[in-house]
Image (spheres, helix red, strand yellow):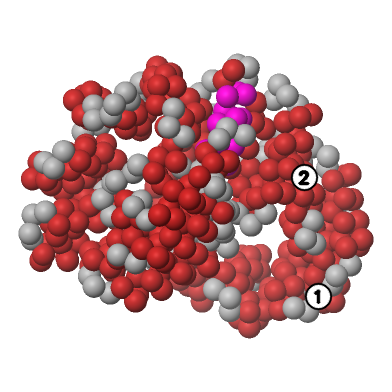
Amino acid sequence: MKLRKSLVLALLLMASMVCFSAMAQESDKITQAVMKVYNDHIDKNPNDYNALFMRANQLYYNNDFKGAMNDVNRTIELAPEKETELLFDAYLLRATLHGINNNLTEENNDIEKAAAIAPSNLAWVGMKGNWAYKSGDYELAKKQYQAVLQQQTRNYDAMYRLGCVAAKQGDSEEAMKWVNNAVSLYPAEAQVYINRALVQEMLGKYRDASDTYLVAMSATNDNGAAISRLVDLSAEHYDDVMASLRSACDDNPRVGIFYRVRSAIALNYKHYGQALRDLKAITDNNLMEYSTIYNDEATCLFQLGDYDQAYNYANKAIAADPTNPDAYILRSKIELRQGKGGNYTTAMKTLDQALVLNENYAPTLLAKARMLIAQKKYKDALPLVTKAINADPNSTDALMLRGWLNKKHLKNATAANADFEKVLTFDADEIESLRGFALHELGRDNEANAWAEKMIQDYPATGGETYYYAAALQAAMGNKAQGIKYLESCLANGYGGLYDIKLNEDPYVNLAPLRSEPSFNILLNNSQLNFQER
């Protein structure tokens, strides 16, 4: 199951987000410098098998598996037989690369070659176990992992692997024995808790797995891995994850991170009322203070229709981090709706402040373009959208908006179709790809419907976001009855954006055509719990 933005969500939950970003940038610079040294040396010494192998390892670390394979093949070709240690490591690296490509036959061949070079080296023994496990030979896998433990009695990875084998064989007691032993041996090690949780997931013990991930979060060497896993688990087992977090909040009422994790997961699934409750617990009790918390609180209040309170928190977000353009974008949306609405002058001034921070930030440019579109200033909006595309050529949102402008209002069908076709060249595996909307604009409604159904199948129903997009697509097509059916599923799955459902009229993704249907208000009235703080 794919989950969009889970890594981003995990990073947002880290208190030292800025620090990690700076570290990542510094790491990239170091990696680039190292690669330059390798490349320059190998260009001058193409047969230096030691350098080739070192570069192969660096390429593997960089996730350039094709490049790593090329270098390790050259290493094995050039290295003399006496270089047994190098060849042993090279065969194991190549086996790993074959495994990534699901080439189990070649993976096993290389493991066997490594074993022939150094039969007593445990590295190949464990890898043989991994190969057997992937191949479904659980008895062989068990034998290999037990062989590792005979010589390394405290090897917690081997214990985890034995737990996985037992889980695959349906022996829950044996599986838990292995991973619990590892926890007993390494009670301060985050990975052993994550391993235990992964085995609990394999056994269908999702609530227990959630509890274990929360314990892993407290380890000093976790670095956000447990939160990422918890977010992934919430995609299909939302209730179990939220139940664990509820217990954690009840037992630790002054620990803000538990409220923060719960609010972020709820927000990820558009459960704005649930998220707001926890965000208020954080801010009201001074448990944490970050710009993103205030911004999320403002987002929830905006979606639930409390514009004055949303405005207050948007200002707090800006005060906490005046350099974040997203906070200004949000405030502009809120300002537009305050009072009787239609406050374009005020909202545009706020967007201009955001553009001072970064004149080429695509989301700000698109937000300003949408403000102009809402005022029917279509020609004024077009250059802003084009500038956004130049700033972010991969923005399907910007391409769709420019295509929509050209098709609907500027009578340039050729340019419009070019943008819609461009959208189809990108990865269609996410809702935000907007592929279905581009297909519809190109007159390919059958394909658009198939895309919407695939999104519904591929992504969890929790939150109903996929149904929201499907309903908007049907609304754009004029299929109101089907749009209402999708809206019903959207609300049944807890979608909590009252603004999105009742008021949003942004081009191409909105429910405006459905709002005149008699059943629309009935569905809305029957789903009031979705739009309440709880």
Where residue 214 sits: x, y (%)? Answer: 73, 40
Where residue 516 sits: x, y (%)? Answer: 34, 52
Kind of residue at disc 2: Thr
Name which residue lies at 28% across and 68% down: 440
Where residue 373 sits: x, y (%)? Answer: 18, 43
Where residue 155 sits: x, y (%)? Answer: 82, 54
Within the magenta stretch, is there residue 271? Answer: yes
Quarter of the image where the N terminus is located: bottom right
Range of residues picked out in magenta: 266-282
Number of the label disc, if any, that sits on residue 212: 2
Name which residue lies at 73% across and 24% down: 253
How dense is the environment of label 1, judged by Cα within 10 Å: few (below 14), some, or many (20 and up)? Answer: many
Number of the label disc, if any, that sits on residue 138: 1
The residue lying furthest to the bottom in this view is: 105
- Give 426 or 195, whichever is nearer the viewer: 426
Quarter of the image where the C terminus is located: top right
